[in-house]
Image (tube, helix red, strand yellow):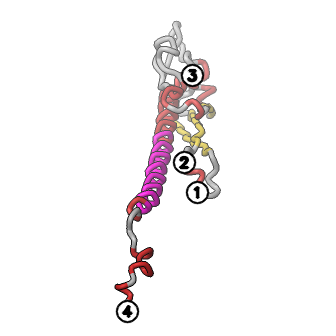
Amino acid sequence: MNWEEKPHDLGLWRQTKGSISIEFAVLGTLFLLIFAGIIDFGHAWFMKQVVTNASREGARYGITYQTDANGVRKVPNAFTPTIANYVLNTSTQNSGKGGYGLLTLLPSNANPTVTLAGTGYTTGNKGTGLEVTVTATKTWLVVSGFIPGLGTQTTLTAKTVMLCE
């Protein structure tokens, strides 16, 4: 008697019922994790671009030549709205005077901050540098559990230095 005549001996090992479901469950989970990672890294890239643009917009707003009612040049730290307020808020929150609106572009847990420095910020003299640094926190949704040492949050920072006009 050969092995083909005994279906009960090797039959359990030759059964393929349900194998497609198991393969789909394993591979589907893997593809779902990869897709979620792509979404998470894409969101981080988007946030970095928004922070970089906010820094650039704040510096551009700060170096422009502005005067008061008497025609006297304003120092950037005396602008209304302030440079930080201009970067963080929209035009409706700045009494219709424009604004980048960083708070509306980032998630609520990003906690963006604007730091201003440079001699151009305090003097406003032509050719002096104004430095605008914007930071925000990226909270990882999926990726942090799969990349050791990444942590649950990453600080995104952008610094722009422009010369006063």
Is residue 39 found inside the magenta-colored segment of the image?
Answer: yes
Q: Secondary structure at mark 3?
A: helix
Q: Main secondary structure of the magenta part?
A: helix
Q: CA distance from mark 1 to mark 3?
A: 36 Å
Q: CA distance from mark 1 to mark 4?
A: 56 Å
Give the extent of the magenta segment. Answer: 22-47
Q: Which mark is residue 35?
A: none
Residue type at tag 1:
Ile
Q: Nearer the viewer, mark 1 or mark 3?
A: 1
Badge 3 crowding class, 10 Å Cα cut-off, few under 14, some 14 to 19, many 20 or more, is some
Mark 3 = which residue? 85
Whichever of callouts 2 and 1 sits on the residue coming sooner in the sequence is 2
Q: Nearer the viewer, mark 1 or mark 4?
A: 4
Where's residue 110, x and y in %?
Answer: 58, 34
Badge 2 crowding class, 10 Å Cα cut-off, few under 14, some 14 to 19, many 20 or more, is some
Residue type at tag 2:
Val
Residue type at tag 3:
Asn
Q: Nearer the viewer, mark 3 or mark 2?
A: 2
Is 35 placed left or right of 109 in the picture?
A: left
Q: Is 113 or 80 nearer to us in this picture?
A: 113
How many discs mark residues in the rendered view? 4
Whichever of callouts 1 and 3 sits on the residue coming sooner in the sequence is 3
Whichever of callouts 1 and 4 sits on the residue coming sooner in the sequence is 4
Q: Secondary structure at mark 2?
A: loop
Mark 2 = which residue? 142
Mark 4 = which residue? 1
Q: CA distance from mark 3 to mark 2?
A: 32 Å
